[in-house]
Image (tube, rainbow, N blue to C red):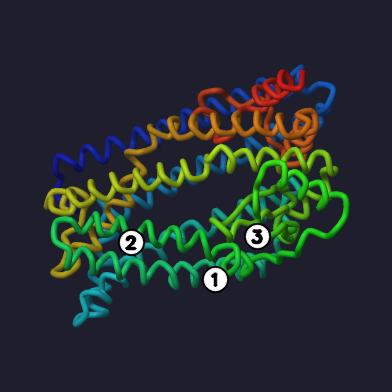
């Protein structure tokens, strides 16, 4: 058991506060949904039946309870990694496995931590997929496909993550005190590359993409794109129904690689008017430059985080207080692992700020859609999506402020209704 230092108490207190805050928020969400499960909100009373409303309440409560399990497991794993010596064990093992190569030892250490976390998360994800989602009729994934997806994700993570990690460790070793700035440049380049190659190289490894067939829908979509001055690499339909009954549409890629993707489940559920309105909303995010604004904000935050990591990596108490004594040549990997394990504990109370910005962007995109399509069609599309995805119409306001990137249904539909008039 490592000796206790001042930051040990700070970390333990922050972790306790984070866990208690998550439990309190989840408790509020469950109680609020239960209180309102027997009455559909008046603005939805003529669109959604009581049975569908109660199904959404049950689904929300089930997901919230599973979230509590995740919170406990994540906190326990973090304690095992840090104060109970798990990281030290993995570091000693990696060093013994590669005694003559500090770089390979560091890569093995970080990979071991990532693999251990994935193994712990796997039963929860399997339960979510094959018990919770199955119970409410959303899961369409076979166990075989689940295993294949998991293996593909691990291999892709290794193929892209290990070279990037090796580059960062090399920069930490040769760039002196400003390694964090050079690492930031490398991170920007990697992120841009990932966004460019995702549509054509990575996404097709998991799903099949077919061009949107000719017909009324494609004609209307192309007319909308022309009105909005948006150029795309193509319109595609994705076989989302292979894995889930949930429907969605999204933009992906940057620059000339941008493409528009519709889930086949979305096309089968919405009519042409509604799909046009949903697409107008997504176009609003691009035309109002929400995407580059979010990317720029993430780059600024990553610069601040790397600067902080650069300072912490020079503080012996940072390692000792978190249960790790770096072996010779292993301190850089130790700093990276500790920082990215501990940072979410201290960052969670700031989550409402990011959620607020996201919800503001959603309102702006809705207003853009109302100017380029009939807002009544967006309302009818959203109502269908709320019902089909079993999204609760009555979330707790405080829980929503922390966790929801989209405005609550009642607020969103209310604003769209005012725009329609």
Nearer the camera: disc 3 or disc 2:
3
Q: Which residue is mark 1?
A: 151
Cα distance in 3D space between marks 3 and 2: 27 Å
Instruction: Tell me: residue 41, above or below residue 214.
Output: above
Rendered location of residue 317, percent (x, y): 13, 48
177 versus 229 height, above or below:
below
The residue at 85%/43% (across/down) is: 271
Residue at 49% from the left image edge and 29% from the top image edge: 356
Instruction: Classify the position of the C terminus by image quarter.
Output: top right
The answer to which of 242 and 176 lies nearer the viewer is 176
Residue 176 locus on image (x, y percent) = 14, 61
First-in-chain label (3 vs 2): 2
Horizontal relation, residue 407 to residue 354: left or right: right
Q: CA distance from mark 1 to mark 3?
A: 30 Å
Task: Using a 10 Å C-alpha cutoff, classify the residue at mark 3 as few (fewer than 14 neighbours), some (14 to 19) or many (20 or more).
Answer: few
- For label 3, the residue is 233
Secondary element under disc 3, as helix, strand or loop, is: loop
* Pointer 2 or 1: first along the chain: 1
């Amino acid at each position: 058991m490592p000796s206790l230092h001042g930051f040990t108490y700070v970390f333990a207190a922050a972790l306790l506060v984070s866990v208690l805050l998550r439990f309190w928020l989840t408790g509020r969400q469950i109680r609020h949904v239960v209180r309102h499960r027997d009455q559909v909100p008046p603005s939805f009373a003529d669109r959604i039946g009581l049975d569908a409303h109660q199904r959404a309440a049950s689904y929300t409560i089930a997901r919230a309870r599973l979230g509590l399990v995740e919170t406990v497991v994540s906190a326990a794993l973090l304690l095992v990694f840090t104060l109970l010596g798990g990281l030290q064990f993995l570091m000693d093992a990696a060093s013994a496995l590669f005694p003559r190569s500090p770089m390979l030892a560091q890569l093995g250490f970080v990979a071991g931590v990532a693999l251990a976390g994935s193994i712990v998360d796997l039963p929860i994800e399997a339960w979510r997929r094959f018990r919770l989602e199955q119970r409410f009729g959303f899961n369409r994934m076979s166990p075989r496909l689940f295993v294949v997806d998991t293996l593909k994700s691990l291999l892709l993570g290794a193929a892209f993550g290990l070279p990037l990690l090796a580059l960062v460790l090399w920069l930490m070793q040769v760039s002196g005190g400003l390694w964090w700035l050079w690492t930031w440049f490398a991170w920007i380049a990697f992120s841009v590359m990932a966004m460019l190659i995702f549509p054509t190289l990575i996404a097709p490894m998991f799903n099949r993409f077919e061009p949107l067939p000719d017909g009324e829908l494609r004609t209307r979509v192309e007319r909308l794109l022309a009105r909005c001055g948006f150029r795309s690499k193509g319109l595609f339909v994705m076989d989302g129904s292979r894995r889930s009954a949930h429907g969605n549409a999204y933009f992906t890629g940057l620059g000339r690689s941008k493409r528009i993707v519709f889930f086949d489940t979305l096309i089968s559920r919405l009519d042409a008017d509604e799909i046009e309105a949903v697409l107008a909303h997504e176009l609003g995010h691009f035309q109002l430059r929400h995407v580059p604004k979010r990317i720029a904000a993430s780059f600024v935050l990553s610069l601040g985080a790397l600067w902080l990591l650069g300072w912490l990596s020079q503080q012996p108490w940072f390692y000792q207080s978190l249960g790790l004594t770096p072996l010779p040549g292993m301190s850089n990997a130790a700093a990276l692992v500790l920082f990215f394990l501990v940072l979410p504990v201290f960052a969670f109370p700031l989550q409402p700020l990011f959620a607020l910005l996201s919800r503001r962007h959603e309102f702006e995109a809705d207003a853009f859609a109302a100017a380029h399509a009939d807002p009544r069609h967006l309302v009818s599309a959203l109502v269908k999506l709320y019902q089909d995805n079993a999204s609760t119409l009555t979330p707790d306001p405080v829980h929503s402020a922390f966790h929801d990137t989209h405005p609550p249904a009642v607020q969103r539909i209310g604003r769209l209704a005012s725009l329609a008039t």
